[in-house]
Image (tube, coloured by chain):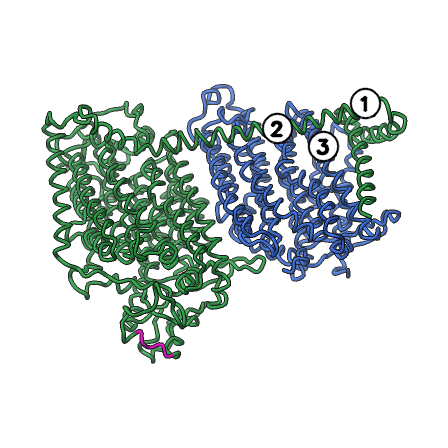
Amino acid sequence: MFAASSEAASAALTSGFFLENAWVIPVIPAVAFALIIFFGRRMPMKGSEFGILSMVASLVFSGGAIMQWIDRVNGAGEEQFIAPIVKTWTWWQSGGMEFGLGQHVDGLTLAVLGVVAFISTLVQIYSVEYLRGDRRYTHFFASLTLFSAGMMNMVVAENMIQLILGWEIMGLCSFMLIGHWWEEGANSRAALKAFFTTRTGDVGLLAGTSILFFAANDWTQKTLGVSGFSIRGLSAWALSGEPSHSAIVWGAAALFIAAIGKSGQFPLHTWLPDAMAGPTPVSSLLHSSTMVVAGVFLVARLYPVFFEGMDILGGSSNFIVIIGGITIVIAAALAFVQTDIKKVLAYSTVSQLGYMMMGLGAGAWLPAVFHIFTHAFFKACLFLGAGSISHSASHHSFEMKKDMGGLRKFMPVTFGTWVISTLALCGVFPFSGFFSKDEIIDNVGHNGYTLFMYVGLGGAFLTAAYMTRATYLTFFGEPRGAAAGEHHDDGHGDAHAAHDDHAHDDHGHHDHHDAHAAHDGHHGDSHGPHESPALITVPLVILATLAIGSGLLNAVPFGHSFENFTKWVEPRVEVISPTGLATVVGGPGASRPAAEEEGDGHSAEEGHHDSPCGKETPKDGVCVAPQLSHAEFKWSKAALSMIIVLLGMVISWVLCVQLYDRKNKALVGLTERNALLGRGYRFLVNKYYLDALYENVIVRGIAHPVSAAAYWVNQNVLDGAVNGAGNITRKVSGWVYRNVDQRVVDGTVNASGEAARGLGGFLRPVQSGKVNQYGALLFGTAAIGALVLVIINT
Amino acid sequence: MEVLSDHNWVLSVGTFLPLVGVLIMLFIPKGEEALNKAVGLGTAVATLAVGIFTMIQFDYGKAGEMQFVAQTEWISVIKSSYLIGVDGISLPLYFLSMVITVLVMIYSWDHVPSPGNPKAFFILMLVLQTGMAGTFIARDLILFFVFFELVLLPMYFMIGVWGGENRQYASLKFFLYTMFGSALMLVAFLALFFKTGAESFSIPYLVENGGAIAKNVQVWIFAGMFVGFAVKVPMFPFHTWLPDAHTQAPTQGSVILAAILLKLGTYGFVRIAIPILPEAAKEWAPWIGLLSVIGIIYGALGCLAQTDMKRLIAFSSVAHMGFVMLGISTLTPFGLNAAMFGMVAHGLITGMLFFLAGSVKERYHTLEIKRLSGMLKQMPRLGWILGFCAMASLGLPGLAGFWGEFPAILSAYQPADGLPVETFRTFMVVAALGTVLAAGYLLWLYQRTAFGEPTAEFAPGHGHDEDIHDVGTFEWIAWTPLLVAIVVFGVYPQLMFKVLDPAVKVALKAFGS
């Protein structure tokens, strides 16, 4: 092993092969991507084997790294700073700046990495069945694999450039995956919208990275010997008291804009529901553990920068907490008016990302990160559940009202996993969502953001209500449409914007069911609803198990010994000497020998509550994480949120029964009778008119006329001037030619004209004489001009 | 300047070998098309072999110094000499010009545009090659000027004879516009010559003595060079010849124009204007920066207004060269490196896009975006390559375009000492917004042409089935090197930066960096 000598028990940190080589994890799927592209079609499983194997390998590597990290943490002192394992290699250098590639591995990295590898593996296995017989099966697996590689690369990134690389690769893959069935206009438009919207946010990423680099580079080079792109360098710099106010404020704000775009925060969330046009496994992967989490991850990764730049815990609301809070509510409200089951889940994702952002904005770092973790499992499970329904019960439709209902009898496994995940999403005790979401709400209040605590509670109510509605429409009541065994081949002409799987429906159907018949012969009527095959249900069951169990990793109510996630993931706050963070290439992870030599030993005794990291400036050495405190868990507070959630479920259930089952006259059609409700309903159905604003006002109303105007100016003003000048020159030269210089210039012109004609004798005579006239004139002018200039200046 | 290598014949041979090919071809009858093509291509390949030899012999440890230097008397009456050499700045472009010529000739093997006559066409390409390579090795202003102008004529005939419907207008405009810039450039060169004591036109001499010229005179001389180079780049507002020339030029002409000819302008800034006139460069830098960012936004807006695929790509060149010029205007090694990288990257990517546009035109006989649809369905490989190039062009990290674009943006945050920092930071933000627009027009183009179902007029069974086929053999051979290079430089940009960096530092010696 690479571990340093273990004599000084409290100081030496253990490491290990997987930790030291975590950078391999994104490389594996990247190589697999190349293999799929070049050899995929010739393989027996059309390339999916490369994808799945690479995911399993990444999972093994991540698992190993996680185990070794846990050893590292457990072997360290209670409050000891656990140095991340940082490595960097020069990628390229230019003008004295160095760009590196490497790894920055700590608890946060490994938590997200583990989730990504795990969900990616399950999604790929699921896709083998779900996309069987698809036209672009190999392409699909290639994109999916590259997508995971991009996310993993972003997560292990040592510096901002590497992070941008992963970030943009995900953008590219989301474009390819959302537009997978690009024959249909709606799908390709959704793909374009996703890429373009996130790309708009990426301006912030480029600008923010530049601002922070130049502001921090001198300091990080001097103090830590790393570049201003380095994550660790930027973190330490942000907390050092060095940064100028404007640099860090602008840098953080710019980066946050990128996070808004990528993580679907208000007002750039509009691409996310449209992204449901992609195949369901893609939705599941994008909206649980990858892509949309990237923005949240960015904020969590560079937390010190946002902490200082956005003035988190500074006593008043900040940009992040406000955006997060708004997103929770507006997305949850939109989930009520959706009829497409995937869109309900999409808005639910947006809303949950709002929770994460709000938590980060309010200083609840650990609960927010834990929510990334738990949310990944239950949201992946819900999406794959929706896919399972469309695959086996609703004839590739996602319309809850039209093609579902009563499915609990036909699909017990899907139903069971769905309910478990729904309860987890709603945050019902003891499902996993409770332990993360309730902690966010609790800590937001604890940190003084009382208003946002109520926003969080309100969001919990809405979540419970819309999920109950979706569950009711899907699994209860009487089967409708395709779920009742009806064929509807007219689904194609449906006006619904992103009617995703219809293309799949049309083209892949026959192969698809032939394949079904081969291994799934016990049901005669392939069009009636039935349970999905094992390749689909097994991932569902695994995810549902985690939807229950993953919360126990950080079950705050059960006492300190259950707070493992906190222990492993939360950065220990300690002032360390800069040398303790020195970059090590190929050696053991940096331990912290220098910190103690400098007599800085108060940290262990006095506990981290007195650490100067945070709003104060560390005197000796640097901090890499701000000081945060945790709320005390109280059952009374938990009970309140439980009551709210239950209330949401019950009210929603009652209304659903009245509306959809009993067809209660007082409720059905209420939005048409009551003007105010009707207006509100239309406001929601039109998604707050944000899409209309972007597409009609900004794109069509501003961008199109502006570009048309610019082009008009180009053609008429600039080019007009050129042509005008040309015409005038021609007239003047004609006049000069005829009247003044005929004898003098003529000889030259003719001679050169003859010469050119001689050279191009085989060419068609294309006004060459005229060109030569101009040439001669221009050169004459040039010579005169030069003389004039020389005379004037001597 | 000491001679660093015994191989100082390689540059002369590499530059003039194409003319030998031309000489041979002059004796081959026009009717012997295959033989003419073979000789032309053979000459280009031989030239490329000399280029490869140059690359191998080049001492990369001394990339900042001139190598393979050769000097002989030339026009002693005006004190101009035949002085040539390459350093880290010239080498990539010098080599690129050879590669592009070979690839374009391979492409031309079965794509000689109407009205045919491969003999003339190949001869022109060889002459063009000599002009391009010569410009990058010339170390004497008059020599530089001669090569710079030598490029014009073949390109003029290429557009004027083998071009589209409006070729006469476009070719004349191209010729006159560039000529106009050249005239001013010549004025500047002459003024420079006289102001430095009428001693020599050699660039090393002028670099040493140019700084001593009074600042206000420098500014005027720089202005002359600026117009000459800016027309070639082309920078806003001198760009209007470009869309017409590109749209009307045959595919081969467009590729060479985009890949190499535009770089003559930016190269002139880096090689001549900035090192010789550092004080003037500082005065002009903010204005160059301003025109660059206007070009970035304006070019992108122009793209959004296009209905023709080729014209859209042409306008995108205005935007991309804006990034290059922005990097140059910072006058920092980092910015100049970015610009140099951007030149090569743009050459590879936009060259590739013009190849694709040519192949689309050949198959569909139109480039009107609204008539094209579902190309991915009809020609999956060509469609994917188009997607790949669009992604590279919009600056996706991991592909070559990003390393020209992002570092240029980054460099604008901190320009050289003495330049207005706040102004450049504003440029940075505007340039970053340009990347969004780039994504907008390229994705729009891709979505409209590649996705969806083919339009009714080109659907199978409507008489176009024979024309519409996937990537052909010669296309593969011509394109693969470019595609590979886009990936290789994207993944490992150090390959080029390590060559550029020392030379760029030498070029910016006057700025103390």
Q: Is residue A602 magenta?
A: yes
Circle 3 — which element? Answer: helix
Does residue B38 lie above or below B114 as drawn?
below
User: Whole-Å distance between the Cαs marked 1 and 2?
Assistant: 26 Å
- Pinpoint residue B308: horizontal percent, then vertical percent: 54, 28
A701 to the left or right of B79: left
User: Whole-Å distance between the Cαs marked 3 and 2?
Assistant: 20 Å
Specify the segment rendered in magenta: A599-603
Q: Which quadrant would the N terminus of chain A be assigned to in this image?
A: bottom left
- Pinpoint residue A300: horizontal percent, then vertical percent: 34, 55
- Find chain B in the image and tell me its colour: blue
Amino acid marked by disc 2? Val
Circle 2 — which element? Answer: helix
- Pinpoint residue B92: horizontal percent, then vertical percent: 64, 50
Q: Mark 2 points at which residue?
A: A717
Q: Which residue is drawn at 51% across and 61% down?
A: A90
Which of these two is toward me, A369 or B483? A369
Which of these two is toward me, A566 or B481? A566
Q: Residue at x 55, y 31 (%)?
A: A710
Amino acid marked by disc 3? Phe
Amino acid marked by disc 1? Trp
Q: Name the residue under label 1.
A: A735
Circle 1 — which element? Answer: helix
Q: Does the magenta stretch include residue B498?
A: no
Q: Nearer the viewer, mark 3 or mark 1?
A: 1
Chain at numbered mark 2:
A
Does residue A32 lie above or below B245 as drawn?
below
Main secondary-structure element of the magenta-colored stretch: loop
Q: Is residue A396 visible?
A: no
